[in-house]
Image: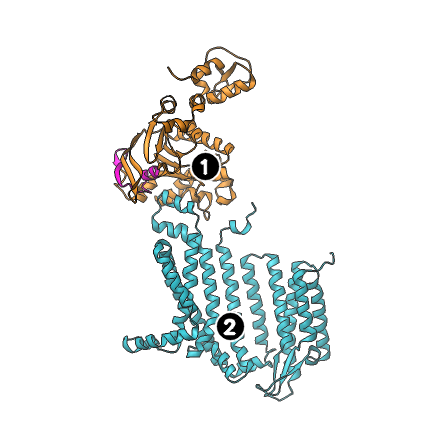
Amino acid sequence: MIEIDGITKRYDGTAVVDNVTMTIAPRTVTVIVGTSGSGKTTLLRMINRLVEPSAGAIRLDGDDNRSMPGYELRRRIGYAIQGHGLFPHRTVAQNIATVPVLLGWDKGRIDAKVRELLALFQLDPAIFAARFPHELSGGQQQRVGVARALAAEPKVLLMDEPFGALDPIIRAKAQADLLDIQRLLKTTIVLVTHDMDEAFHLADKIAVMDKGELVQYGTPAELVTNPATEFVQTLIGASERPFRLLSIETAGQAVEPGTADGQPVDAATSQRDVLSELLWTGRDALPVAAADGTLIGKVTLEGLARRAARPQ
Amino acid sequence: MSLRLDKLGVVIALLVAYGTLVAPFATFRANRIVPGEAKSILAALPVGAGVVLLGLMVVAAAIILLKTPALLRLAAAAVSLGAIALFIGLTATYLTPPENTYARVSPASGFWVLLFANALLAADSITRLRPRPGVRVLLLLATLAGATAILVSGLWDGLSILKEYAGRADVFWLEAGRHVALALGSLFASVVVGLPLGILCHRVEPLRAGVLNTLNLIQTIPSIALFGILIAPLGWIAVNVPGAAAIGIRGIGAAPAFVALFLYSLLPVVANTVVGLAGVPREANEAARGIGMTDRQRLFGIELPLAMPVILTGIRIVLVQNIGLATIAALIGGGGFGVFVFQGIGQTAMDLVLLGAVPTVVLAFAAAIVLDALIEMNTPSQNRGRTA
């Protein structure tokens, strides 16, 4: 659990982050959104003390994050940034092993961890371990960057626009992979982005920052149905509201009994994507299949329309 | 093979033609200071040898002129260099009258032009072959070994420059030692001081402009003037600091030369350290901090390794510059190869000047090749073979 308590950062008297208080539940994905200059990155960087706050405190599982030297704190918290930040003179394996080496793990444990993470990120250790970062594609570099952040098995992973430099197709894949890995490792993820689609896709809770203040902190559905300010409304986009609602939940959550014709959609597909498929194929229902391929029911146009409407 | 002209080859072939046909190959003088008598290749060598050399040069020029494989061009350069090195030795025995110890035979402009043209050809073909750094150092060693073999064989003993050497062999090696000690010692001192200073300038921004401007200013002081400026403070130290005089600190001599070379060396070392550190990718630095490296770990693990090629480039500049500049030390009794240069100028004995100048050039050239190889070995491969 991360408790952010009245945290403020001032530069030359101007508050960049102004008295922000929020609690991040363990094993969840929290996305901080806002325009550039809203203070979202500064807020993130105060969690691992890359930026020292002017006032307030941050507690990790009850312990003040100033109870140990900053570099020791940062070794316990994963950190991944835009443009991956890999060390160009070190191999992929050496990059991933950075923090375990700093922590003084023995060689066998480090090697095992590197292999495990490479496999987890779908990079064959036999091929990729000895490569240098410039020999990888953008998507592979980004995966190695996240693998490095997770190498010392941190409970918390901070990500600063981690997918910002990726093209849309690779980005979607990277987001899906991140969710899978989060479910597997149960890491608490705090991610900063200015991409609202990304936020709605990934977040359990979204924190909206505007001019240094936390203007709303809630689930994606709360943000759509009950925006706290004009700014949140604008950020979500009035015309996007029904689609945002649908993008939060999966087809599996909208399943109705019965069968339908057509190519089954995966239960993990977002309702928004199912709606799109329905509209495009001109059908009013599609069968839904579970991960193992068994049909579990159908999703109807009517059912989705009901879910996309403003809650009464 | 199509008969097309090589662009650089045309220039080199013209140089070879000029050096072979127009310029004199050797100069004969009755003694070491009178003006000489220029001799063409045919006049400077026994008839058979002269024709052989002319023929060789014609073949070489043809290879150079046309677009030919780089390896063939390198072979042509190596054979030509070997040939002119051997034949210049032959001119000495051929032109010097028997039993005459006053007469001097020295290489003339044609020899130097041929040497330059073929060295250029060798350098160009080596560049085209793109050898690995280790291979380049081996080529250098092979060349030096070849030159040493000729020197030891006595083939060049009749040449004027070696006659000058024969008279001062002891002094030559003494001054050579001083020259190298001066150049390397001041380089070492400038790295020991300049590297931390560069790191400090990188970390403490307000310091940067002041330090770099001061070092720039020092760089603009002429060396003679700097020697003059140093006489007073070093003289004072020698008199007033106990033990200073005992370790050789005086107003003139090796101490001011060392200090001057050290001061000149600081700018390239400090400036390149600052530039190298500034060139470290921002994301790599950011990530290093974000995942928990201490400042020291970041400096030694990330920043210095990534800045190393640029820092080494600064050290290369300093080493080559110092080997050349150390010649000036002789002006204030600091020793080194400059001793022969200035003696030679004083006696209008050009051969003596060459005895000081040629080893200096060879030394600087060798140092440049070795350090270039070192820089390439330290450069991450992305800068070498990047395709995308």
Magenta part of the chain: A42-63
Residue furthest to the top in view is A258
Task: From the viewer's side, name the closer residue of A222 and B38.
Answer: A222
Q: Position of residue A72 (x, y in %)?
A: 31, 43
- Tell me where residue A179 sits by quadrant: top left
* Callout 1: SS: loop
Instruction: Give x and y (percent) for residue B71.
Output: 65, 59
Q: Amino acid at mark 1?
A: Gly
Q: Secondary structure at mark 2?
A: helix
Count numbered badges in the picture: 2
Point out residue B44 in the picture as x, y percentages from the top left corner: 68, 80
Identify the subunit bearing mark 1. Answer: A
Q: Look at 56% across and 72% down and name the residue there.
A: B148
Query: Does residue A129 belong to the magenta stretch?
Result: no
Assess disc 2: are there few (<14), some (14-19) or many (≥20) residues with their C-alpha within 10 Å of its C-alpha.
Answer: many
Quadrant showing the N terminus of chain B:
bottom right
In the image, taking residue A186 as reference, residue B171 lies left or right, namely right
Q: Which colour assignment does the render follow?
A: by chain
The colour of chain A is orange
> In the rendered image, which quarter is residue A17 located in?
top left
Q: Marks 2 and 1: which is nearer the front? A: 1
Disc on res. B360: 2
The chain displayed cyan equals B
Q: Real-space Cα distance between discs 2 and 1?
A: 55 Å
Instruction: Determine the residue located farthest toward the front in the rendered image.
Output: A230
Residue occupied by mark 1: A164
| Residue in the image at 38% along x and 78% along y | B252
A50 within the magenta span: yes
| Residue B50, visible in the rendered structure | yes
Measured as percent of width and height from the top left, residue A193 is found at 41, 34
